[in-house]
Image: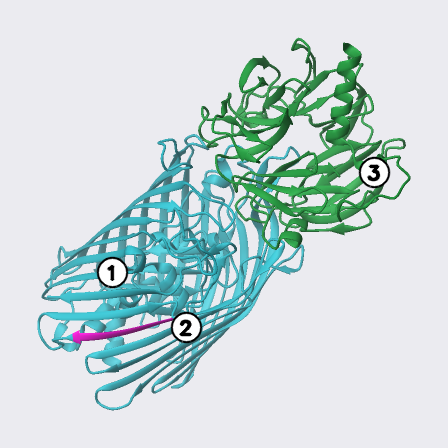
Chain colours: A cyan, B green
Amino acid sequence: MILRYILLFLFAVGFCSIAQAQLDSIQNLDEVILSDSKLKIYGAGIKIEKLNDSVITKNATSLTSLLSFNSNVYFKENGFGMVSSPSFRGTGASQTAVIWNGININSQLNGQTDFNTVNTNNFGSITIRSGGGSVQYGSGAIGGSIHLNNNLKFYSHFNNSIRLTYGSFNTKTSYISSSYGNSKLSLNVGVASVNSDNDYKYLGTDRVNENGAFENLSINVNMGYFLSEKDILKLYHQSYDGERLFSGTLVAPSNSKYEDNTHRTLLEWNRISGKLSSKLKLVHLFEKFKFFENKTTDIYTFGKVSTWLLNYNLNMRLSNKLQFRTITEVSNFRGGGSSFGDPNRTAFSTTALINHKPNKQFEYNFNIRKDFTSDFKNPLLFSVDGAYTLSKYYTIQFNGSKNFRIPTFNDLYWKPGGNLDLEPEQSYQFDLGHNFRLKSFDFKLNTYYINTKDLIQWRPNSSGIWQPINVAKSLSYGLEIEEQSTLKINKNQHLSFKGRYSYTISENQETKKQLIYVPFHKGNLSVAYSNKAFSMYYQHLFNGEVAIIGDRLEGFNVGNIGIGYLFNKKGKTQYDINFRINNLYNKNYQNVSLRPMPNRNYQILTTIKF
Amino acid sequence: MKLNKLLVVTLFLGLFFTSCSNDDDNTPQEPKGDYENGILISHEGNFGKGNASVSFVSFDLSTVENNVFNAVNAELLGDTAQSIAFNGDLAYIVLNVSNKIEVVNRYTFESVTTIDTGLNNPRYIAFLNGKGYVTNWGDGTNATDDYVAVIDLATNTLESATISVVEGPEEIIATNTAIYVAHKGGFSQNNKVSVIANTSVSTTITVGDVPNSLQLDNSGNLWVLCGGKPAWTQAETAGQLFKINTSDNSTTSIDFEGMQHPSFLSYDDGKLFYYLGGEVYSMTSSSTALPTTSIISDLTFYNMTVNDGVLYGVDAKDFASNGTLTSYDLSTNTEVNSTTLRIIPAGIYFN
């Protein structure tokens, strides 16, 4: 255990020449190289939950369904596969940052990530970091951040895997990947595709989900190479190409289509030299969308942004107890689109992080950041977090921070309405966490407080034109409970249980009313049982009632069940077959008002590893 | 001839705009329904959110019944109620985003039929000689597919032939012989009024930029209030008030000063009313100059209408909370009553 801890620590700071014999399974190796080491070392006081490969593959359709059932994050989904936006701790979609291998990839156009455009198959692990993180992760990390990580494995291997699913509504997904490595080189390549007619039945009516078909293709290539014992070069690339028809509502038909493209490339040079380690990153991000009001014509509106980013990261281990890091980043964003000409923006940020472990029980971090942007002024950001281990069984975590969200390209430049006088949203947050850990039982209780001012909202101005202004204030507070336990029944049989519940108050400070689409109550649980090669699981989601404009939308319960069998478990070539029923109780429910979600549906998943 | 025309126009206006409360008949009549003798307010609701509704309000604003269509017919009205128009005992509720027209009995609000084929971004409807004429933007992003759909009022079904028109047909009004369509411009800006006789455009009249409202007066003139192009287009123009003589379609106009953008033209008893910069202005229709002072100020109207010496204005507030309806006595220009309605009240009609 201690050995593993040390290893993890060493690798977290980027020391990568590992003795593979000491690690007993692939599972551990997954954790060996986190592309984003800030998550671990400068985050002792932050609630972090990691979803590993096995959880990801069970929920292989989209990031929305993965996180709905496996985190406290709440989603607003415009019908299955359509635009999906998260609400983390009562905040909005643009206050949740999505981080790809350490880089914030929220759209520069609307400040959000559509969680149905992220194919989870592409990632080795997905980490949920609750609470403010703007110091480390920049704009939008207010409620929390979702981290999509690709892992590089430096040991001798050559593995291939083919994963195929077929399900109701002619939904097909495939993921083909190949991973090769030795002590100097690591290379993995994956191609993922999804396509679906998505013409599910609207329960309680004689209609189906019309104009809801979607398909997407994504490719990822990740490579690492030791130039010398001290230098490692890493390359991460991902391309995504999606086409969706946007379905209508129960009272409005739709004939529209949406195409989106993203390309992300990260080239990183790590150098570890004694107590100093440095990372130089060069990043290119590209996003583009085309919206066709009428899918049968070729008339469309579009928006695109190309981002170049240079980031230098220097870590100094002053002693075993104290380390210090500086991050300097310069970025340039060039946009273009039907509704805003060709704006461009340059930003510079500088960050300092200090990690101190005065003794074995206590560890804390103090971080500050300042951004300089060509269009507006930015606040000085800071965060403090710490963890105190009171006993083997109990750790207390705390963190407090000031975070921000910058105005998006749409907010600034949209015609009509774009407002160049906007300032970033500012938010203070505090979080207190209790972690109880027994042998096969983990329990976390977090309480938090988030106070946000200068919230950007679009409102009609005196001439009737919608315009964004820094107008609203919101206050969110609540609690989150997470429980995890595993039970080894005997040598072959395991039972595991995970449950989460969150209670969220998120009020508009003007009206003192709960914000729309923030449920007071959300909970989920999953139970998994395995006996040798056989496994089964059940997942349940409870989503409480939410306020919508002028009305309420009732809450719902949905359950999924799955069984699986792994053939040739010990052999070189393994076959895994799974059968899954989604919406087991055939519940008629809506995530967003008037946009029904699918009826009971079935899915077969097979994986071949060789 | 002129007198005859005047009579017809007056009769038409009577049918179209005034309430049935003016019946001088003293013998008690069977009420035609719960929603007779009052004001109907159409609520757009939020675009794409399917929360359009209609409220019934008494003339003194003391009683309000919201969600009338839903209450009577046990179904949702639809998405973005753009306008309502009356023909006989029927009300035609035009739902822009739902691409449909709900036809109901105007007094009971019981559903008669739903016209939900052949419409694409429908906006307004007018009636002439047994036909209903519906302005449609077509696809908002397509400047060349705009049309006027024709409904056979005997069957309330759409006729297969449509009338192709220039971009952005918005308000529509019928004289006794022709249909006039104001082309506000849809997503863009336009400056035309189309004249439709039978099933084709007979004349296209150029007016000011962004013709946003139409009114017929007692002398056979069609008044067209043009808002002008807004500043964000970077080709800003000031508003203009156009008068079209419907006998020969000749025009005269008055320019607004500076970069003023007026809207919500109303007509009542020989006077024109319009809204500009949070204030209401009034002028006699014979005036050749615009008024320099307003009659009511400090307003945030989303729409307004004048009826029988009373001005009714709706305020959509922040578009996410309940809006209001307020009435003003035009003999004193003071507020009389105010009441809270639903999300985005937008159209005011007298039943």
Looking at the picture, do discs 2 and 1 lie on one chain?
yes
Disc 1 to disc 3, C-alpha distance: 65 Å
Q: Secondary structure at mark 2?
A: strand
Question: Which residue position is annotated with label 1?
Answer: A166
Q: Residues within 10 Å of mark 1 (few under 14, many from 20)?
A: some
Tell whether A281 sits left or right of A480. left
Tell whether A581 sits left or right of A339. left
Where residue A20 appears, as percent x and y from the top left, is 14, 72
Sequence-first disc among 2 and 1: 1
Task: Give me the disc on residue B115.
Answer: none
Q: Which residue: 52% across, 42% down? A: B98
Q: What is the chain letter for disc 3? A: B
Q: Quadrant of residue B265?
A: top right
The mark closer to the camera, 2 or 1, is 1
Q: Quadrant of the C terminus of chain A?
A: bottom left
Tell whether A268 sits left or right of B146. left
Task: Give me the disc on residue B21.
Answer: 3
Task: Give me the disc on residue A540.
Answer: 2
Pick whichever, B179 or A20, lies toward us. B179
Q: What is the chain letter for disc 1? A: A
Q: Which residue: 75% across, 26% down? A: B13
Q: Is residue B322 visible?
A: no
Q: What is the chain letter for disc 2? A: A
Give the extent of the magenta segment: A559-566
User: In the picture shown, does residue A461 fall above or below A100?
Assistant: above
Q: Main secondary structure of the magenta part?
A: strand
Q: Which residue: 72% across, 30% down? A: B16
Pick whichever, A138 or A62, lies toward us. A62
